């Protein structure tokens, strides 16, 4: 790492990370050639890098993986959570090695190249993670040039000029089209199961603010018939489908910005006493609809090993998380109670309405990657619709 303006590109360096404060970090580029600007964060999961890169919640972000061996099992057609990687790029410690998995279809570096995403290896990711923890998630540019020719001043200016995620609505960019969801669980060697929903299965309308596919699969697995609608779906469009319940998905960006069009619809659903289950961004939007406020976090929570305490009985769930904003529990009205808290920093991780069949959690109970401690929430929601 160097803070000089601007250091000489060392011999063999084909990748660079330039932070908004002028810090320059060199490494070995892989994947796509070019540059991208976004928020630099870190992720603590030891597995599931393909699921992480394709999680739409990572739109606008560059991921520093704390686990050193990323790419070692290659990629396949099943371990994706969207139709493309939404993360802008990734920073890793070790060079990407040849795939070592019978499930591999394509090496990770080649997959990134085809998908237009940039990677840098050879970086001291422990030091970079400590920096983010102490100073917060910075804006940065990630760049890859096989010839090692970088205009560091221009990259620095680009990082400084990027406005940051606060105030940015990204759900509108990652949301999908209206569709029926038909697959459920996954079996090794057979892939995902197509599921013909029972005629009497409760109908869930899922609002896609940037959802991971495994969310919909878990709803199906829990016994629901699922229709997915885009983030801009109106109250009238939702109710025309005669849902038994509403699901509010995860997604990227600032919830206060997405709230401009999402909250009025959610408030109408609340007024209609519709059963609602939200996660991540959906959790935050539900809190905003209730009258609460959200705040930008110092470093955010991103990983597959986050302990969350369930307040009703003290049970600790190990959860998968991906969020840079949090709901301020102190701003919630009297009819909305806090149900879960992070054991890392005490931030809010769950709410429930005392007068409506409505609840939400900040974490990702669908995992992929991550533990499966919290699948019961899907079952709780779907069973409550019958």
Image: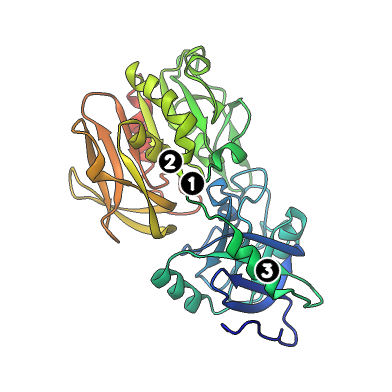
In space, the residues marked 3 and 2 are separated at their CA atoms by: 29 Å
Q: Mark 2 points at which residue?
A: 256
| Residue to which mark 1 is pinned | 167
Q: What's the distance in space between the residues labelled 3 and 1, CA to CA?
A: 23 Å
Figure disc tally: 3
Label 3, residues with CA under 10 Å away: few <14, some 14-19, many ≥20:
many
The quarter of the picture where residue 343 lies is bottom left
Query: Colour scheme used in the picture?
Result: rainbow
- State the quadrant of the C terminus: top left
Is residue 98 in view?
no
Q: Is residue 118 toward the left or the right of residue 306 in the image?
A: right
Task: Please say if 293 is above or below 91.
Answer: above
Is 99 drawn above or below residue 75 in the view shown? Answer: below
Quadrant (top left/top right/bottom left/bottom right) for the N terminus: bottom right
* Residue at screen point 66% across, 85% down: 7
For label 3, the residue is: 155
């Amino acid at each position: 790492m160097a803070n000089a303006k601007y250091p000489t590109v060392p011999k063999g360096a084909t990748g660079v990370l330039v932070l908004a404060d002028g810090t320059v970090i060199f490494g070995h580029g892989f994947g796509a050639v070019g540059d991208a600007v976004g928020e630099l964060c870190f992720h603590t999961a030891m597995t599931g890098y393909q699921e992480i890169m394709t999680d739409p919640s990572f739109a606008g972000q560059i991921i520093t993986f704390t686990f050193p061996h990323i790419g070692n099992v290659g990629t396949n057609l099943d371990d994706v959570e969207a139709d493309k990687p939404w993360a802008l790029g990734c920073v890793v410690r070790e060079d990407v090695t040849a795939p070592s998995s019978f499930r591999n279809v394509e090496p990770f570096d080649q997959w990134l190249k085809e998908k237009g995403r940039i990677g840098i290896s050879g970086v001291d990711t422990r030091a970079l993670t400590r920096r983010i923890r102490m100073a917060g998630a910075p804006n940065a540019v990630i760049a890859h040039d096989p010839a090692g020719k970088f205009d560091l001043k221009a990259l620095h200016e680009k990082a400084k000029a990027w406005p940051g995620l606060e105030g940015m609505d990204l759900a509108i960019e990652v949301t999908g089209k209206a569709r029926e969801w038909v697959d459920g669980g996954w079996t090794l060697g057979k892939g995902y199961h197509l599921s013909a929903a029972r005629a009497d299965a409760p109908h869930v309308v899922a609002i896609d603010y940037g959802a991971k596919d495994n969310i919909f699969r878990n709803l199906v697995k829990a016994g629901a018939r699922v229709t997915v609608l885009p983030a801009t779906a109106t109250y009238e469009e939702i109710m025309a489908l005669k849902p038994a319940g509403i699901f509010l998905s995860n997604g990227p960006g600032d919830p206060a910005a997405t709230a401009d069009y999402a909250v009025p619809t959610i408030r109408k659903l609340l007024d209609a006493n519709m059963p609602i289950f939200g996660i991540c961004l959906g959790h935050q939007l539900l809190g905003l609809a209730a009258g609460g406020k959200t705040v930008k976090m110092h470093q955010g929570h991103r990983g597959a090993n986050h302990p969350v305490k369930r307040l009703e009985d003290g049970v600790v769930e190990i959860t998968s998380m991906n969020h840079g904003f949090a709901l301020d529990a102190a701003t919630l009205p009297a009819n909305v109670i806090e149900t879960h808290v992070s054991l890392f920093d005490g931030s809010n991780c769950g709410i429930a309405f005392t007068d409506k069949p409505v609840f939400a959690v900040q974490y990702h109970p669908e995992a992929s990657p991550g533990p499966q401690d919290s699948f019961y929430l899907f079952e709780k929601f779907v069973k409550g619709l019958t």
